[in-house]
Amino acid sequence: MQKSLIAFIWHHSRREQFILVIVTLLLFPLLYLTLELPKRIINDAIGAQSDAVLFYGFEISQTALLLTLCFAFLGSVIAHGLLKMRVNTMKGVLAERLLRRFRYTLVGRILRFPRSYQARVSEGELVAMVTAEAEPLGGIMGDAFANPLLQAGQMITILLFLFVQNVWFGLAAVALIPVQAWLIPRMQAKINVLNRSRILQMRSLSSEIGEMSEGAPVLRQHGGWRYRQAAMSARLGKLFETRFEIYHRKYFMKFTNNFLTQLTPFFYFLVGGLLVINGQLTIGALVAAIAAFKDLSSPWKELLTYYTAVQEVSQRYIMIVRRFAPADLLKSLPTEAEPTATNAGAPTIKLDRVELEDGDGRHVLSGAELTLEPGSWTCVTAQDEGDCTTLALLLMRELSAHSGKVLWDDVPLADMSQQAIVGRIAHVTSSSHIFEGTLGENVMLPLRQMPSEALQGKLRDEAERSGNSTDSALTAWHPAQVSADVIKRAEDGWRELIEMTGGQRMLLARVLDHPLDAAQDAAFFEALVAARAHVAVQLERLDLMPAVQRFGSDTYVDALTLPENLLGGTAIQNRWLDPKAAAAFEVLLSDLGLRDAVLAQGKAIAQTLLEVFDTVETQNVPFQRLGLPDGTMKELELALQRAELTPQSKPRQRRADEALFLSLSVNIAAAQLDGVYSDDLKASVVAARKAAADVSSSLSADFIAFDLTAWHPGISPLENLIFGKIAPTSRARREKIKGVVVDVLNGQVDHATLMDLIHKLPTARRGKNLPQQVLEQVSIAQAVVKGPDLVILDRALASHDPAARTRTLAAFRSLLPEATILQLETETPKDGLHDRDIELRQGQFRAVGQEDEDAVQTPETSDLQRKLQALRRAPLFRELSRQQLRLLAFSARWVTFKSGSYVFRKNDLPDGAFLIYEGNVALIERTETGEEAFALYPTEGTLVGELGLIRNDPRRLDMRADSDITLLRIEADDFLPILETDARTGFKLIQSLIGYLDRPDRR
């Protein structure tokens, strides 16, 4: 990016700026006419001494001359105004185009940030810089050249006019300009320093607000909001002080400038008046001069304002550019397909004496050498998970080696085009980033080179509304198109992966909970409705039908709202009916004689809500499930008070309160408030259903009547397929019903339709609505879709059980049989899928079992590595971050015991947990007489005594050394904080507690 704002503007708009300058120059002759003609009107026409006036050699009547000059003045004013309007419009359009270019450039740079830099920069700070901080730049981008030219040209034109009238007028007009030109920039320089400080403070404020927003639940849970609010108060106070000083200096500068500007009119009135009195100057010339000087002050002020704005905005531009220009910024992303410098097909990857450090400055590779043969599957095991990530980033060219080379078929990786890196390398991780949209859009991301049709339509609509070219809205997207054959192969590969790994069941189960769009997904309805009968048969066969409240003409379905039960159908849209909308049902209820009963039911619901929930704190999950609009609880409280204390209230108020109570009855289903709806009201509603259908033709348009042959878009696919609602029951029965539905779909609906359904599974930002296993499946599916030549499996499918992981990786290999695969793990897997095992030790690649004959270890590093290796053997610690694991290893201590000695005795207070490193131990339960009742023999890598630390109970067993043993002792003060700060470790501990809490060997 250009280092200065003016350079950026000139680089991207030199042609447009030149045209703008030409149009601006046309303003000045018209401006001179607007100054000269008033003087001529006064002196030559109005002040003429006779009816016949000699004007530029032509004799003309005084009236005709007046009319001619006045209309000439009007024409010049109109022409000058229209041309100036055109100039301003051109400047505005140019400013918006340049601002769009600037923001687009910044967003493109975000995509090229190295990962280490990305982790250090706050997301809120980047958003603020691209949006709010960049906004003021647009005001200068259009004015960069035209505005100073316009203002300076106006000044010169007005000064020329003043000098023509009287030399002293001209000198008086320019007398104080040098003083202002010297003083104002010096005052502005101090303001610029304060503005830089203000911008930095605002960035920090944005970052802190974003952090507090994400951590708000934690602050509420642990009570840390007071400290955070105090820190926020201090930051806002500092920002206030900075802004106060800016205002003080800025408005003092304006006062000084205005004072100097108004001195000149003082001399005009004084000296000019004396000249007119003495007959040395005409009154018309004085009036024109004063008017001209008044016009002169405006462009001079504009010039000073422009100068101060350019100074401020230029500093802002420089600060933004510096933030978006890290030293190790990645190369430019491609805008079209680039030729690759390598041969097609699986590559030979070679690391030639590579030296590499991680973000902490620790050596990961020290002159390392490794060769990956074409089509091979190599598993590299590193003790530190950070080493796996660093090695993957090296091969993805996200990191650069300090020395040595990474070769791709004898071509340096650094010389390959970015398009080749993108298209030929896949990085599969256990934490794939999911974008908001659908599952299919995320899986097909490697092929999404153009926006979706819906997004294209949205962009075109926005372009038409803004008056821009329709095609210009899409210029930022990749111009290349992906062929239909490539897309079909990618979709087939994803489908085969799902089928081979059994992932189709899991994904379909999630699809069943998300309503389909009636407009976009109508193609699925016929196939799904056809499967409804098979679902009913299977539910009957497995005796699961009692758990379903089927839609019917003679039943009240508790999970449906009162209007749905009354009209015998499901609402087309699930939306809250406000009191005004509920009034339409009041008429129907009155006709059916149900109004009073439903109104009483609404009051009962309101009383129940006020008994259970607070009127202010409504952020809990049970309340949010009800879907009440904000402020409803307070309104209900006041309405009930009025109903009890002032039953004879004003009719208008009483009607509003009744409408509020009715809205509760027509929106909240009986299943949402167990036991509140009376059985008599339910029976009355069912009995009135037929009459309601005859009366409410207008209301029925918003509902779809219960029909086994129709699709109901207002409810989920699961409820459509079972044609009812699942009664409140155990989670196990619901999952069984869902499993039956999935089995029927797999048997009755073709796979292409099911894949289309899975493709439309909604995804929230960062995949927050999807389980970890689905996120991992997305990452590996993206690699299948891409069809790369090199695949890096970076601890992929970590949350899957070993059998599922092996099955998925085997299917993955069958779909990419010719790809070169590098698998990175912290422990060597025993699945037998890969061709060879390599260990990364002391910065070198060595075959598993190969001794480090030449490795030189210091006592500190060798001891730390032993501890890290020991801790990773315990399942409880495997998912700790590298930093946490290293801190735990640093504080842990080796302890040794001779054969026959005791590590601890029964009833001893727990003072630490012990990790068995080597040797044989026995955990012994003794009777009251001291005899041995039974013994357990934990193996090496077992953690003993951790639950006793948590419960702080005395030891229940003896721990005896049956041979010379070495243990790693972990103190309670080091162990317990990990459980408090690391959710995954705490969850693993809970899993170990379930089913094992009463086992004596865990004490």
Image (cartoon, rainbow, N blue to C red):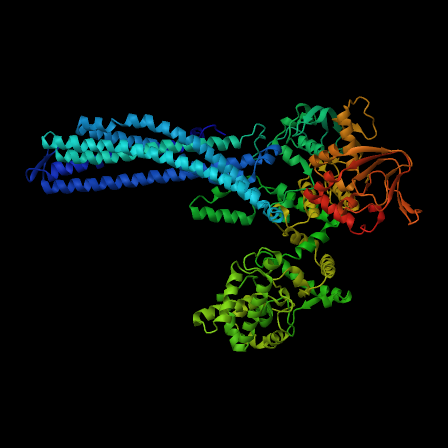
Q: Is residue 22 visible?
A: no
Q: Nearer the viewer, residue 935 or 432?
A: 935
Q: Residue 806's spot in the image, x, y percent?
A: 78, 43
Dividing the picture into quarters, in which one does residue 813 lie?
A: top right
Q: Quadrant of residue 352?
A: top right
In this view, which residue lies farthest toward the left? 50
- In which quarter of the view is residue 17 placed? top left
Q: Residue at x 28, y 40 (%)?
A: 81
Which residue sits at x=22%, y=34%?
292
Identify the residue shown where x is 34% and y is 29%.
184
**In this view, 379 is above or below 445:** above
Residue 955 shown left or right of residue 361 in the figure: right
Q: Is residue 593 visible?
A: yes
Whether residue 39 sits left or right of residue 772 in the image: it is left
Depicted 258 relative to depicted 781: above or below: above
Q: Position of residue 417 (x, y in %)?
A: 61, 30
Residue 172, position as x, y percentages in the image:
22, 28
**Front-most of 425 and 524?**
425
Q: Position of residue 644 (x, y in %)?
A: 51, 71
- Horizontal side of 32 relative to 908 (left or right) equals left
Report the number of numbered marks. Answer: 0
For residue 267, side relative to residue 381 (left or right): left
